[in-house]
Image (tube, rainbow, N blue to C red):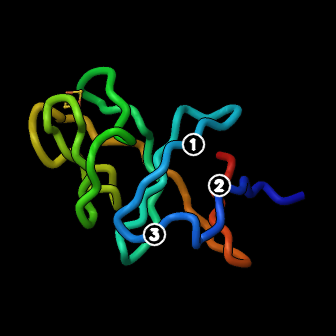
C-alpha cells in the first residue's frame, strides 16, 4: 500500500504560488512553487500565530504576513528576525503529473 498522500496536480500551482493544505494527521502544510521546484513546509510561522499562506513567496523565500519574518522554503531555515526557529519541512514526490507528500 502506498504511503503517498496526494496534494494537487502539478499544473494547479503556478510558479510563485503557494497553497495551504489541511490534512488529517498533519499540522497545516504550505505547498510552494518556487519556479524551480515544489517545497512543502509547515504553514504556521514559528514566531507567533500566523499563517504563512497569507504571506508572500519570492523565489525560495516565504515572508510572514504579520511581522515580516522570513524562511527559506528549501531548508525551512529562518532568514530574518523576529523568526529564529526554522520551519519543519516535508517530502515532496511528483508522480504522474501530481504532487504528493509522504506519511512519516
Ligand atoms: Fe511571523 Fe511574527 S508571526 S514574523
3 or 1: mark nearer the eye:
3
**Mark 1 nearby-residue class (10 Å; few <14, some 14–19, many ≥20):** some
User: Above or below — where is 57 with respect to 35?
Assistant: above
Local SS, label 2: strand
Contact between marks 3 and 1 (CB within 8 A): the answer is no
Mark drawn on residue 7:
2
Q: Residue at x 71, y 56 (%)?
A: 6
Q: Residue furthest top?
A: 49
State the image quarter where residue 82 is shown.
Answer: top left
- Asked if residue 80 is positioned above or below residue 33 in the image, the reply reads above
Query: Does ligand 1 reach within 8 Å of label 3's beta carbon?
Result: no
Say which label, 2 or 1, has the lower sequence index.
2
Q: Residue at x 34, y 65 (%)?
A: 16
Where residue 53 appears, x then y in whole percent? 39, 42
Residue 71 x %, y %: 24, 48
Does 44 sit above or below residue 96?
A: above
Image quarter where ligand 1 lies:
top left
Left or right, 96 with reference to 53: right
Secondary structure category for the residue under label 1: strand
What residue is at 29 percent from the left and 30 percent from the top?
46
Q: Which residue is mark 1?
A: 21
N-term mark: 3 or 1:
3
Q: Residue at label 3?
A: 14
The percent coordinates of residue 59 (x first, y second) are: 26, 66
Of residue 14 and residue 80, the one placed in the foreground of this image is: 14
Residue name at image x 63 percent, y 65 percent: 99
Question: Which of labels 3 and 2 is toward the front?
Answer: 3
* 102 lies left or right of 52: right
Callout 3: SS = loop
Amino acid at each position: 500500500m502506498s504511503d503517498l498522500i496526494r496534494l494537487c496536480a502539478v499544473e494547479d500551482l503556478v510558479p510563485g504560488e503557494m497553497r495551504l493544505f489541511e490534512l488529517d494527521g498533519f499540522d497545516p502544510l504550505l505547498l510552494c512553487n518556487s519556479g524551480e521546484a515544489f517545497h512543502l513546509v509547515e504553514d504556521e510561522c514559528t514566531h507567533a500565530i500566523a499563517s504563512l499562506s497569507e504571506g508572500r513567496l519570492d523565489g525560495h523565500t516565504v515572508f510572514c504576513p504579520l511581522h515580516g519574518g522570513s524562511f527559506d522554503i528549501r531548508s525551512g531555515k529562518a532568514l530574518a528576525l523576529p523568526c529564529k526557529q526554522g520551519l519543519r519541512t516535508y517530502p515532496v514526490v511528483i508522480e504522474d503529473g501530481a504532487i504528493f507528500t509522504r506519511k512519516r
